[in-house]
Image (cartoon, rainbow, N blue to C red):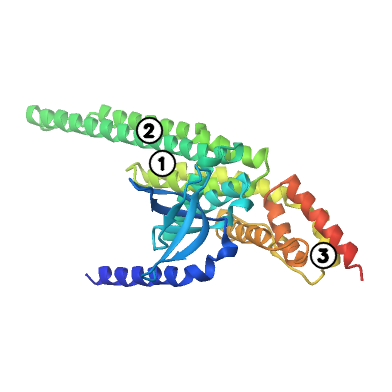
């Protein structure tokens, strides 16, 4: 009862916050802001991406957000800015690119909490509407991961069923032997049968781990596209799914540890490739330090020593830096923008972003040579 009361109070608080903040955060200047919202089309309740146009205050003081569907037929819809029914995404419609959607989806899909779930759902919906190579790559990964997860669970279910059947048969045979000859020795075929089942399960699980299409997507991102941010975000999701399935499988601790090591090794190989390629941007970093000797950033730090360091420190820090590059101006705010971009370029090789950095640095030097 107490938890229910606390939840209701929190819901009222956040609802009030949304209503009181709507005028402040969603003004005429915010026209084009993307929202993942729940609204009625007159017949059913929809949950989709909409584009904010303006806020309307009704006679009773309530606020409605007048919006249009994103890539829809352009008809007007009205959204109530309430908790759980309206999530503000990070972009205006004009700012959106497929690369942005892929990165946001991959990042929020490995985060936990109410906000993360809403953002993940919103960016997934955007990815489905965009239908571009980079967004489809991430979406196909999640579909492959679901198939991979089902294959692991099927292997485990078949193993448990066979194990239960084998144990029942063994118990029946043992009872029969005891009744006919109480002093007869244990039949070693029971142990052999159990060992065979364990080997079949091990073979099936290892095959699923090594041959999953999801793994090939991750490796392609690291090897060919040199997008370690996306690779690590997707690997983290793969890790969560596979380790959870193995943890609750009922298999021996020895086999669990062996399989977990194989999963870990996939991530370690990506981490090592990231470390090896961090120096690709060293000329840009040296040029930046020449102009800004007192500026420091994550790009100067020692590389991640293990997967825990990569997932807890480097991936979130890269995301934060990348968000800065989206909100700061490379011209008027170049010192901070360039500092953030250097960190992003260490983890993501993108010729367009590299060219943008080079141009911005050159312009800064040209107009600030004194």
* Nearer to us: label 1 or label 2: 2
Task: Find disc 2 in the rendering and name its residue.
Answer: 201
Q: In this view, does 355 lie above or below 31?
A: above
Q: Nearer the N terminus, badge 2 or badge 3?
A: 2
Labelled pair 1, 2 in contact (Cβ < 8 Å):
yes
Camera-side residue of 73 and 175: 73
Q: Residues within 10 Å of mark 2 (few under 14, many from 20)?
A: many
Q: Where is residue 27 in the image (x, y as percent from the top left)?
A: 55, 66
Labelled pair 2, 3 in contact (Cβ < 8 Å):
no
Q: Nearer the N terminus, badge 1 or badge 3?
A: 1
Task: Find disc 3 in the rendering and name its residue.
Answer: 289
Question: Rounded to the nearest whole Å, what is the CA distance between mark 2 and mark 3?
Answer: 55 Å
- At mark 1, the secondary structure is helix
Labelled pair 1, 3 in contact (Cβ < 8 Å):
no
Q: Where is residue 323 in the image (x, y as percent from the top left)?
A: 63, 59
State the mark number for residue 255. Answer: 1
């Amino acid at each position: 009862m107490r938890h229910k009361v606390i939840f209701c109070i929190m819901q009222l608080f956040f609802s009030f916050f949304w209503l009181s903040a709507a005028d402040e955060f969603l003004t005429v200047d915010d026209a084009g802001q993307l929202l993942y919202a729940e609204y009625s089309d007159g017949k059913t309740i929809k949950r989709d991406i909409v584009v904010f146009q303006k806020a309307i205050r009704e006679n009773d003081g309530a606020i409605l957000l007048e919006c249009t569907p994103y890539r829809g037929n352009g008809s007007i819809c009205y959204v109530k800015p309430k908790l759980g029914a309206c999530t503000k995404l990070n972009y205006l419609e004009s700012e959106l690119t497929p690369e942005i959607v892929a990165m946001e989806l991959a990042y929020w899909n490995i985060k936990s909490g109410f906000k993360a779930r809403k953002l993940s759902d919103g960016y997934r919906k955007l990815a489905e509407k965009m239908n571009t190579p980079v967004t489809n790559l991430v979406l196909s990964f999640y579909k492959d991961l679901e198939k991979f997860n089902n294959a692991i669970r099927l292997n485990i279910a078949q193993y448990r069923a066979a194990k239960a059947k084998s144990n029942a048969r063994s118990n029946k045979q043992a009872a029969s032997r005891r009744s006919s000859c109480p002093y007869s020795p244990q039949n070693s075929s029971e142990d052999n049968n159990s060992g065979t089942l364990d080997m079949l399960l091990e073979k099936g699980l290892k095959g699923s781990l090594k041959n999953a299409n999801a793994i090939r997507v991750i490796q392609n991102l690291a090897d060919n596209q040199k997008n370690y941010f996306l690779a690590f975000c997707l690997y983290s999701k793969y890790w969560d799914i596979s380790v959870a399935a193995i943890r609750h499988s009922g298999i021996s601790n020895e086999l669990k540890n062996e399989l977990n090591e194989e999963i870990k090794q996939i991530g370690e190989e990506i981490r090592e490739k990231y470390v090896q390629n961090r120096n690709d941007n060293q000329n840009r970093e040296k040029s930046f330090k020449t102009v800004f000797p007192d500026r420091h950033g994550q790009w100067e730090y020692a590389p991640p020593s293990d997967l825990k360091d990569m997932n807890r420190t480097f991936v979130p820090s890269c995301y934060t830096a990348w968000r800065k590059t989206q909100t700061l101006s490379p011209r008027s705010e170049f010192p901070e923008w360039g500092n953030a971009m250097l960190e992003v370029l260490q983890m993501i090789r993108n010729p367009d972003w590299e060219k943008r950095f080079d141009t911005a640095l050159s312009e800064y030097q040209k107009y600030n040579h004194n």
